[in-house]
Image (spheres, rainbow, N blue to C red):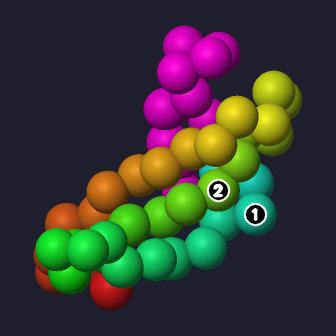
Amino acid sequence: MTAYCVKCKEKKEVKDAQQVKMKNGRPAVKGKCPDCGTGMYCILSPDKK
């Protein structure tokens, strides 16, 4: 899974990725940037689970 790192300003592979459910019920992936360690978050479409 890739997500955008706001600190590095580029898309990277998510380290320690875990799938979570947001308050509104939509799925998302949460993890860390492999280079700088900043938290990364990627919202998925409702049909991807």
Q: Amino acid at mark 1?
A: Asp
Relative image position of residue 22 (x, y in whole percent): 31, 72
Residue 2 as seen in the image, left or right of residue 43: right
What residue lies at 16% left-to-right and 74% top-to-bottom? Answer: 24
Residue 42 against residue 33 in the figure, above or below: below
- Give yes or no for contact between labels 1 and 2 (Cβ–Cβ under 8 Å): yes
User: Is residue 13 something one can see in this rendering?
Assistant: no
Q: Amino acid at mark 2?
A: Gly
Please, what secondary structure does the residue beneath circle 2 have? strand
Residue 36 as seen in the image, left or right of residue 48: right
Residue 40 against residue 25 in the figure, above or below: above
Q: State which region is magenta.
A: 1-12
Instruction: Residue under label 2, please give it.
Output: 31
The quarter of the displayed image where residue 12 is located = top right
Count the numbered circles shown. Answer: 2
Question: Going from the N terminus, do you reach mark 1 or mark 2 first?
Answer: 1
